Amino acid sequence: MLGKYFLRKFCFIVPLRNKATANVWDQTVRLCIETLASVSRQALVPSEVILVCSEFPDVVLPSNVTIIRSDFPNPKPNWQDQHVDKYNKIRRGLVELKKRNHEYYVMKFDADDLASDRLVPWVLDDDNKTGYVVTQGYRQRGRLFELVKQDFHNQCGSSNILFASPDQLPDSMSDNRKFDLLSIGHDIAVETFERRGTPLAPIPFPGVVYRLGHGENITAHYTPTDDPQAKPSWKFYAGKYLNHVKALPGNLRARRLRGEYYGDQVALGQKSRALD
């Protein structure tokens, strides 16, 4: 069984917002370190992790984390520009992945979410060569966890895992060909692949923790555009995030989840490899 894990590789691409646009930079960094520890801590088989950012403190991270630092301009404080910045960083991560000339399962992963340590082994063992969707997960606010039993992928951006050969990845930042990992949003991926006749397979367990209420979510703080008449973002997203959830006692659930979703905040290992 373990031999199958070496036929394919799995990579998390983690874009991080700029320091100048963070609400509280220390909080942004802390959440990101927890995210990196979580996605790096997979059972039986290691994942690869690419963090793309303008800056990041010199801290000890898991050895399978590569940091790519580039001079990304500060986006304007609105949802649209923030997402352009996010996808520019994802593109930069995919360009780096292209250089490795290997087939990958790729997951775009927000820098404040957490992954189950069962996620990578399950995908690599099943290996459908199309992709997967996280339909079940948890929403976390402080110590309160809410189980989302279906349609989690319509709420959380860290929910699609797509298979990509080298020719399905961009050659450079100026490569404007359409690539699924850049052109298909998390909320339309399921329908898009179903129309193609190659549906994404659902992960059969809660695969991700979507953390909210900590002050650093883009969708929680920005209006859709610079239009002063635009509705506040909480109205813009009202109803989208409130279906199919069940509140659970926070302390008990946190203890039960911690082993599966939380890695050590600063994992033992050498300093991550940085690419400037």
Image (cartoon, rainbow, N blue to C red):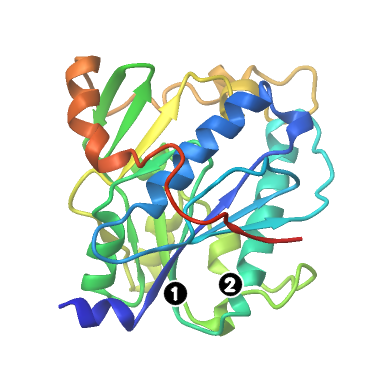
Q: Nearer the viewer, residue 78 or 140?
A: 140
The answer to whether marks 1 and 2 mark residues whose Cβ atoms lie closer than 8 Å is: yes
Q: Residue at x 56, y 78 (%)?
A: 168
x and y, in percent, of residue 3 in the image: 22, 82
Q: Secondary structure at mark 1?
A: strand
x and y, in percent, of residue 129 in the image: 34, 77
Q: Is residue 88 left or right of residue 202?
A: right
In the displayed structure, 266 sits above or below 14; it is above
Q: Is residue 108 left or right of residue 148?
A: right
Q: Nearer the viewer, residue 61 or 162?
A: 61
The answer to whether residue 151 is visible is no
Q: Which residue is under mark 1?
A: 104
x and y, in percent, of residue 155 in the image: 41, 36
Going from the N terminus, do you reach mark 1 or mark 2 first? 2
In the displayed structure, 221 sits above or below 173; it is above
The disc placed on residue 97 is 2
How far is the residue under mark 1 from the one under mark 2? 9 Å
Q: Secondary structure at mark 2?
A: helix
x and y, in percent, of residue 79 in the image: 68, 33
Quadrant into which the N terminus falls: bottom left
Amino acid residing under circle 1: Tyr
Amino acid residing under circle 2: Leu
